[in-house]
Amino acid sequence: MPQYTPPLRDMQFVLHEMLNVEQAFKEMPPHADLDADTVNSVIEEAGKFAANVIFPLNQSGDEEGCTYVGDGVVKAPKGFKEAYAQYCEAGWPSLSCDPDFGGQGLPELVNNVLYEMLNSANQAWTMYPGLSHGAYAALIARGSAELKQTYLPKIVSGEWTGTMCLTEPHAGTDLGIIRTKAEPNADGTYAISGTKIFISAGEHDLSANIIHLVLARLPDAPAGTKGISLFIVPKFIPNADGTPGERNTVKCASIEHKMGIHGNATSVINLDGAKGWLVGEPHKGMSAMFIMMNGARLGVGMQSLGLGEVAYQNSLAYARERLQSRALTGPKLKDKPADPIIVHPDVRRMLLTQKAYNEAGRFLTYWVGLMIDQSHKHTDEKVREDADELVALLTPIVKAFITDNAFESTNLGMQVFGGHGFIKETGVEQYVRDARINLIYEGTNTIQSLDLISRKVLLDGGKKLMKFGKLVQDFIKAQAGTPEMKEFIEPLMDIGDKVTKLTAELGQKAMKNPDELGAAAVPYLRVVGHLVYSYLWARMAAVALAKPEDDFYKAKLATARFYFAKLLPETAYQIRSARAGSDTLMALDAALF
């Protein structure tokens, strides 16, 4: 049977030793009184809920899956509804929400920590409240006062859940060609008609109402993305007293049978003149959608971080217990018929790869969470602006780099288990299946790569990338007098220099042939991702070097050395691939494939 223990010690290391959140919160008036002990207490309680309530439902939920009963009715796996009720009763949906609507007003960073643990415990279950948080973010930013008062208190409390209805059978990434229509009604509402597919948590029995945020076109909409509007379409139209009222004509036609995340209802949603309310301005739905999408992309990074962590914990436990063959340097357990497989170099390579990717991913996602808080609440306008630009730069890294790495990590977890990993009983193969979707939805990793190189780097002349580069240079200068840091600083300087040169080279090529960006985008993101991780690992190594006698820091330092020696060299291949150009990809006529 699989196991999961929230990695509280490493979480606290990132929060307090790397990010110094107590001091950071003092510069944000809404959180100025929030201290380290309170943060620790919250995440400890969150860990208990994740490990004790939803983790035991992960395997059973995967095996049972969701059930389409008929006539639009879907039931989640056994125990999911009861666990969700406990989640709401404990106040977890409201953790980082606005107190004006019943929220607790804690930082988004603390919510990120909660979601790491929830995703480790049960990604499919976590998607139900996770999608609601995206709906909350869009409404708080773009909704009218009336819509906020009607819907936000219910979403914040968890009584009602939310979805994002974007994709259509013919339109995934290219939302500019969606066909769902919105016809104005005499009462100021709209009649929404169309079909949406791949809607996570689109129908279920966990909450009393489901609030769909739907992209659609008004009759006078211009073509393309400039003609998209956003509408709120509730499953049940709220009564004046806030209770669910008349059943709206939005219905689940079917649920998908998928490779993974079986416990989440991925739905086909039909809208047949369903009553909806405009969110924001007409034809301005894309900006509201990006609020949801950017939040979702960060959320998918948290999903993969969670899966990478739980896969590592289980493969590590197995490697310590599984006896198989003798160590190449001679028997380690002479009283046993064989040694535990953790003595073998390649098993250690797999475990350290998981560990290195998880710990850097944790630092990255928590740092981005802190910068989101700073971008909204810091007293200094320059800090808010810098944080916002860095979040924009790092969002595709969080989504694509972490999900790529976590899929590798879950696969390595299965490999550590060997044949036993391929069997359902151990639970490891589920992590591989669940992790696979994270590379696809909320914008495929290729889309993230194109977004990074074209929009986040080249579009502003490299301004955001240079802002990150300054952080790296400032850190390098600060470590100039520490000889022990040379082994980390030199490769960090090297990869920074290579990214600068590669970016300039690709920018020049793209001006002559835009296909050059398409050919180089994926390897480019891998290289920039490693630059980010190199910076984060060097920072962690600097802290660990100061406490050489403590086992926690010994492990941190050893993992840093492994990262620079064994994982960073991937960039040599990726740089060469990025520079290889588009000719070998585009020369072959499509008919000859």
Image (cartoon, rainbow, N blue to C red):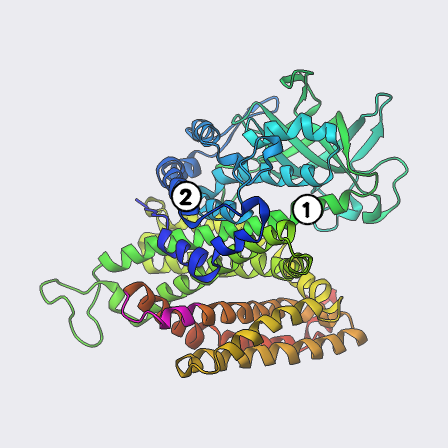
Could you say which disc has been placed on residue 291 in the image? 1
Residue 495 x %, y %: 55, 78
Q: Quadrant of the C terminus?
A: bottom right
**Image quadrant where one finds the N terminus:** top left
Q: Residue at x 50, y 45 (%)?
A: 33
Q: Nearer the viewer, residue 406 or 8?
A: 8
Nearest the viewer among 375 and 25 is 25
Give the magenta part as a residue range.
Answer: 540-550
The answer to whether any part of residue 114 appears in the image is yes
Q: Nearer the viewer, residue 177 or 31?
A: 31
Q: Is residue 20 above or below residue 348?
A: above
Please, what secondary structure does the residue beneath circle 2 have?
helix
State the separation of the CA atoms marked 2 and 1: 26 Å
| For discs 2 and 1, the disc positioned in front in the rendered view | 1
- Give the amino acid type for the residue marked by disc 2 in the picture: Ala
Residue under numbered circle 2:
121
x, y percent for residue 176: 79, 48
